[in-house]
Image: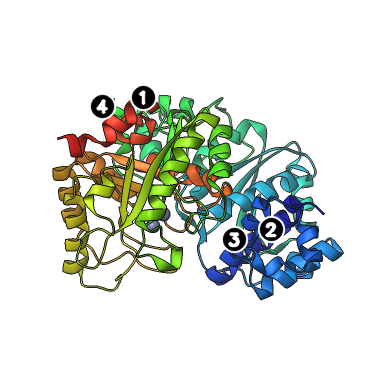
Amino acid sequence: MQNQDVAKILNRAARILALRGENRYRIRAYQRAAQAVAALPENIEEIVKQNRLQKIEGVGKALAAKIEEIVSTGKLALLEKLEQETTPAGNNKEILLAWALAFCQDFLPELKKLAAVKKVAVTGEMRRRQETVQEINFLLVSKDVEATKMAICRHQQLHRQEWEQYSCRAVHSFGVRLRLDLVVEADYIQQLWLATGSQEHVKAVARLVYEKTGLNLLQALPFANSFSFATEADIYKLAGLPLIEPELRENRGEIAAAQTGELPILIRAENYKGDLHIHTNWSDGTASIEKMAEKAVEMDYEYIAITDHSQSLKVARGLSIQRLAEQKAYLAKLQAKYNLRIFCGIEVDILDDGSLDAPDEILAQLDVVVASVHSGFRQSREKLTFRICKAMQNPYVQILGHPTGRLLGHRDPYDVNIDEILRTAKATGTILEINSSPDRLDITDKIALQAKKAGIKMAVNTDAHSPLEMDNIDLGLSVARRGWLNANDVVNTVPAREILDWLHRKRTG
Ligand SMILES: [Zn+2]
Ligand SMILES: [Zn+2]
């Protein structure tokens, strides 16, 4: 059995546990084990034979037993149980966007196989890339809606079905709430637009269309459409507007901006040049610097910054000043091997009094300095705000990492004065991070928009602890897009040859 196969099974178990709203530590344990196994330089079977599983970082006794089971039997009984078991009540918790996306990736091909289905689109909150999702909406284009309806009725994983004409609410075996809308091709674009929402946005645009043309887009009956659209842009054209992208459809002023030609040109993945917050196995990451660099090359990045934890963060095996110097020398040697700039950085802890966990002389020698709070989450609003603002005053701190510290579904944001943080960021020229970890997505889309309006730059980083987590960049970019950010608002779009000058503006004055 290959390491990748074992990792795949562990990852799948993590996903299903997440969709069921299981404890995040249990989910993370499976994920971390999967990443560790995938990153191993030797074959997993060898390690099992020699009884060395628990020596792997991130693999405890319980997971060692699971891995052994996978290697010896080729499967995991827990996973089989999870796949078959139904949670008919449905999970009332909101699902993180990352898990919902993973679910769609798995389930979309299944829907495509149903009788008479021509294509399937994801709509609703997911298409607008909301950070958490209550219900996943699919739009199925069918050549024969009756036949497709029958196929759904018989589907073994779709429970508690409630039909209203050709729209069905159901609960998937994994506990996920779904809505499936069936349409014929001619109705596809209109339904796609209606189902994508948000409701307020759709209503406002429909009103404009009605005023201009007398056409009521909200009233059209399924399968009786006398008009058909080729693209969503055609709908907006009827309202006298340019296309408004799904992430903006929240009725937060996007229609007025479209009317005055002030819609942002949203940042896209192609604009993104490199990740400025990455951990390796020098601190609490699961992979080597080389593995992270290889992944960056694969992703076509121009640069990455290695930003392992600073010394005080013992739980994350923070680097001593000595180790940091060793890492810097190592990176310098490694540089020639890659067609990629590898910046030497740090994620320096903001200590209890707002000072930093490394002296200025050391920070001055580093390319990239991210400063973050990792302790004292329950301190008073004044104290936390003071700590963060004091750290931003430091001329070597370029980026404030995960500024509000929230963990979706687990920990609220720290009680901080966001307005004051934004004011200080602006005054000191400090960049605010949009952290792409699935349960962080910190700062939020709303704060990002507020920061943009205040003229503050942002960095979209993954804070990846493994190569796989570098793919989370899509989540961070979704937040940026929902926050109306264009490429210019985000420092990671600056090319390699200019980025350091850009980042060092604070220290050079
Ligand atoms: Zn951090
Ligand atoms: Zn970090």
Q: Residues within 10 Å of mark 3 (few under 14, many from 20)?
A: many
- Location of the C terminus (image quadrant): top left
Q: Which residue is mark 4?
A: 260
Q: Count every numbered label the image shows and give the total.
A: 4
The dot on residue 497 is 1
| Of labels 3 and 4, the one closer to you | 3
Alpha-carbon span between mark 1 and mark 3? 35 Å
- For the N terminus, the image quarter is bottom right
Q: How is the image coloured?
A: rainbow
* Mark 3 vs mark 2, CA separation in Å: 12 Å
Amino acid type, callout 4: Thr
* Foreground residue among 63 and 104: 63
Q: Is residue 377 above or below residue 102?
A: below
Is the residue marked 4 within 8 Å of ligand 1, measured from its CB?
no
Nearest the viewer among 6 and 411 is 6
Image coords of residue 229 (percent x, y): 55, 27
* Cβ at disc 1 under 8 Å from ligand 2: no
Report x, y in % for residue 221.
57, 41
Going by the image, does 113 lie left or right of 276? right
- Which amino acid type is shown beneath numbered disc 2? Arg
Crowdedness near tag 4: few (<14), some (14–19) or many (≥20) residues, C-alpha within 10 Å: few
Residue under label 2: 12
Q: Quadrant of residue 54?
A: bottom right
